[in-house]
């Protein structure tokens, strides 16, 4: 009997969508090693010249004009993508996408970004009869996700389910599974072993993330945190942003044995396990990973649109708040230095997590659909 084939399609507008695709791919293979999975950023794969230019322009807009991004997000929020947009995608990618699907012969197609979702939906309408699953990778439901040809939506929360229902999606086509995270986040690592691996001390520890796109908060808040450096360990993860890493390394404020400035690392799961507080932009994937670790979170500079919705969701869940002042820093840093209070607070977060989320739910739902 041949292996079941799963094709997962994403796009590179932000790292979270593709991370979710890879996470789900690995989760599926963890639960069923006999599966065959492939992950593609569809636009970049089919058009490797134009797609990177579009993604680069998007990144620059996010960095320099986030309000424009928010306006674009809200302007088409309630309705599915219009016919002109779908026709343009059809003409750009239809033939190549059909060729890819015909060659790979998947038993099911999963999309973690609206653009490949629209393309595959169009193929389903005219040329293929392969089930299409849509995994919404934020805590909001933009209209661009909605297509009649989608067989099943796997969503992060009951709030997203309600918003899809309001957009006309039938209830039996929606499953609340949570956002998939990589299996390495499923387990809890030994804190002493992780500290030894990274040469870290047994101190209250803050994990600060979000510099890959040059969006790490460079104003007073980050510098102010260094005032706690004698009693607090700061791990500043800035991804592939080498310019920012050099800038921070050259700054005397950050030259201290309790401050660690790192670039890209595949061990964020381990660093979360030895951290007491996560400071991050509210991307859907990072928030879900922190959520699964029952890690308190401070959010900064959400991109208008889905990141604002992510932020609101976790604040309402009691997992943290917006980083708006030095007083916010002091209040949360004081909390993590109060061992008894922190233990009680994190137990509440674990209870809330256990009520609403299991990282196995999303891959299990896909396996049931197969």
Image (cartoon, rainbow, N blue to C red):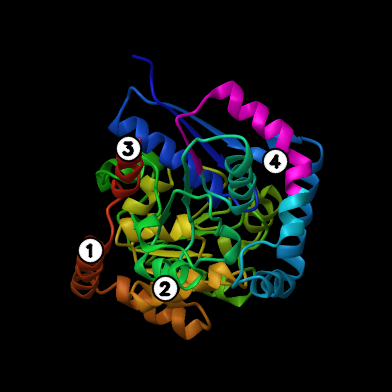
Label 1, label 2: how many angstroms apart (C-alpha)?
16 Å
Mark in the foreground, 2 or 3: 3
Q: Which residue is mark 3?
A: 367
Whether 333 is among the magenta residues is no
Residue 32 in which image quadrant: top left
Classify 312 as above or below 115. Answer: below
Say which mark, if any, is on residue 313.
Answer: 2
Label 4, label 2: how many angstroms apart (C-alpha)?
30 Å
Classify 153 as above or below 278. Answer: above
Q: Which residue is mark 1?
A: 350
Whether 105 is among the magenta residues is yes
The residue shown at (50%, 77%) is 323
Q: Which residue is mark 4?
A: 43
Q: How busy is the neighbourhood of tag 2: few (under 14 within 10 Å), some, or many (20 plus)?
A: some
User: Does residue 266 show up?
Assistant: no
Comes first in the chain, label 4 or label 1: 4
């Amino acid at each position: 009997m041949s292996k079941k084939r799963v094709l997962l399609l994403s796009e590179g507008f932000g790292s979270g969508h593709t991370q979710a695709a890879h996470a789900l791919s690995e989760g599926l293979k963890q639960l069923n090693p006999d599966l065959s999975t492939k992950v593609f950023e569809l636009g970049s794969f089919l058009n490797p010249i134009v797609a990177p230019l579009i993604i680069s322009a998007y990144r620059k807009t996010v960095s320099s004009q986030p309000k424009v991004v928010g306006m674009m997000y809200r302007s088409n929020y309630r309705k599915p993508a219009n016919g002109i947009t779908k026709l343009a995608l059809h003409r750009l990618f239809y033939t190549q996408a059909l060729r890819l699907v015909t060659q790979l012969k998947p038993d099911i197609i999963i999309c973690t970004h609206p653009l490949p979702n629209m393309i595959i939906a169009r193929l389903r309408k005219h040329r293929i009869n392969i089930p299409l699953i849509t995994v919404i990778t934020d805590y909001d439901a933009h209209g661009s996700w909605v297509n009649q040809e989608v067989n099943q939506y796997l969503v992060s929360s009951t709030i997203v389910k309600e918003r899809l229902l309001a957009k006309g999606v039938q209830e039996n086509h929606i499953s609340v599974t949570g956002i998939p995270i990589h299996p390495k986040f499923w387990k809890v690592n030994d804190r002493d072993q992780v500290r030894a691996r990274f040469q870290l001390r047994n101190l209250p520890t803050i994990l600060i993330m979000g510099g890959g796109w040059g969006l790490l908060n460079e104003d007073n808040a980050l510098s102010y945190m260094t005032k706690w450096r004698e009693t607090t360990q700061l791990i500043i993860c800035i991804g592939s942003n080498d310019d920012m890493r050099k800038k921070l390394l050259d700054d005397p404020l950050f030259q201290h044995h309790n401050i660690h400035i790192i670039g890209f690392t595949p061990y964020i799961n381990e660093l979360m396990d030895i951290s007491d507080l996560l400071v991050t932009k509210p991307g859907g994937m990072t928030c879900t990973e922190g959520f699964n670790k029952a890690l308190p979170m401070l959010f900064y500079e959400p991109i208008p649109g889905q990141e604002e919705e992510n932020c609101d969701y976790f604040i309402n869940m009691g997992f943290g708040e917006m980083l708006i002042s030095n007083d916010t820093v002091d209040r949360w840093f004081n909390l993590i230095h109060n061992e008894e209070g922190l233990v009680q607070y994190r137990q509440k977060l674990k209870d809330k997590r256990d009520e609403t989320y299991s990282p196995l739910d999303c891959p299990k739902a896909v396996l049931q659909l197969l």
